[in-house]
Image (tube, rainbow, N blue to C red):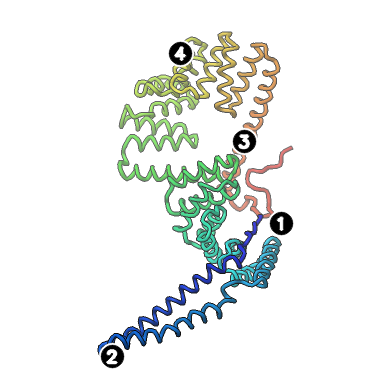
Amino acid sequence: MHHSTIVHQNHDESCPRQIISSLARAFSLILQCYEDQGVAWAGRVNRMGSRKQVKLGLAFWPGLLFAVLLVLFSGHQGLCQTPDISQAIKLLAQQAENDLHQQKLSEATAEYRKLLALDPDNVTAHSNLGLAYYMQRDYARAAAEFEIALHHQPDLLNIVALCGLSEAQSGDNSNAVVHLNRAFAEVREPSLRMATGRQLYRIFVESGDLVRASEVIVQLQRIDPSDVDVLYAEHQVYSLLAYRAFESLARVDPDSGRMYEIQGDEMAQVRNVPGAIAAYRLAIQHNPHLTGVHFALGEALSASHSPEQQAEAESEYKKALGDDPWDEKAECRLGNIELERSNLQAALVHFKRAIQLQPSDPEANKGLGVALMELGSNREAVAYLNRAVQFDPYDETAYYRLSLASRNAGDIDAAMREMEEFRALKAKKDQLKRNFLDLLEDAARMAQNPKSFPSAAGPGGAAGTPPGAKDKP
């Protein structure tokens, strides 16, 4: 980390200001003395008359003037730093900065403290002393030094961030949130902004403010969409929000249709298709027109191994559209069903309606492109399939269909590129499926016989084979 050094103001130029400040202090003392003497003078006026008072007052002023001169000239050495002191400050700053860069933190700390004894308002010294404390994990002292620096120069955004991080580490979350929020909004350096965001997320989650935590995660994903810790945090916070909603619903109306719908959603996520179907049917019994439940039941029926239940899915998608005519997902599913039947004109109607409802839906664009390709309109199909891969760049089947349409339209180079993309995406997805199945197998074996499961640490304390990582030929 680079630490800039502030060019200090020439101390000789500040002497007039310091002298004026000392004059003010001296006259403050004088006035105090004058008030103290005034008590005695008031008593004498009654006995001696105003002339005695004036004489006594005039006699007192030479002493006051002497006090002024004494303060000014005896303190002159302290008011204006001599060249020797300025040089000492400069040398201490250079040595402290070198020690800080070389991670000689104790030495740097001592040197910055000496420097501040000579120059208490040195912003760079306070900032770097705070950094030295921070690197030594003395977070309370670090925060104190950063606060002093910010008092003198509030626009030091990196110091705002470090101050917030220090306060959070020392348990002062109320002040930490103020500094971290400002830094997260204004700091532009990605790693520091990521650090402040992660700290904010931790504070919000621990305090139960899950909504603000989710807002931070959205910003962190924009900084680094591939950060695995951020992705896990996203899963964590939305899982916590989902569970909180479930608990609230259970308290408000535990026997409602929505409660059964949530149970169906949970079962569908773990691929318990029969359980999901049963839960969705119970939800419909409680409320036949519950928005979204017919579509959810249609999805579960489509995933069933029973041909009868798969056929029943179509009627559920139609019921979903009856309850919500703007359900573009239901339109897409009905379009896919007609596409499988080779009823291309009916498929076109459903997919066009879905695109009208949601132009950026990748499934609707892909479905319309496939239907057009089957009808021989390859150039028009290419346009929609290109939109599909633009809206969902991880859909390997869309690339495969696009490659076929480009070849049929005579664009061989594009067809080759799109086929390579399809193969690369398919290989990645196949590997992900294998890894997931390995994890499930390992979890099942561990549940049956925990002692036979390989430990995380191998011989000699070295890391062993993690769960799911198998030797491949």
Q: Are marks 2 and 1 in contact (CB under 8 Å)?
A: no
Numbered disc in front, either 2 or 1: 2
Nearest to N terminus: mark 3 or mark 1: 3
Which SS class for mark 1?
Answer: helix
Nearest to N terminus: mark 1 or mark 4: 4
Which SS class for mark 4?
Answer: helix
Horizontal and vertical percent for residue 149?
Answer: 54, 61
Q: Quadrant of residue 385?
A: top right
Q: Are marks 2 and 4 in contact (CB under 8 Å)?
A: no
Nearest to N terminus: mark 2 or mark 1: 2
What is the C-alpha distance between the residues marked 2 and 1? Answer: 103 Å
Nearest to N terminus: mark 2 or mark 3: 2
Establish if 229 lies above or below 461: above
Numbered disc in front, either 2 or 4: 2
Residue at position x 62%, y 64% from top? 10
What is the C-alpha distance between the residues marked 3 and 4? Answer: 35 Å
Q: Amino acid at mark 1?
A: Pro
Nearest to N terminus: mark 2 or mark 4: 2
Say few, some or many: other residues with alpha carbon within 10 Å of mark 4 (under 14 / 14 to 19 / 20 or more): some
Q: Nearer the viewer, residue 152 or 15?
A: 15
Q: Which mark is residue 459?
A: 1
Q: Are marks 2 and 3 in contact (CB under 8 Å)?
A: no
For residue 370, side relative to residue 98 (left or right):
left
Numbered disc in front, either 3 or 1: 3
Q: Amino acid at mark 2?
A: Met
One can see residue 106 in this view: no
Q: Amino acid at mark 3?
A: Leu
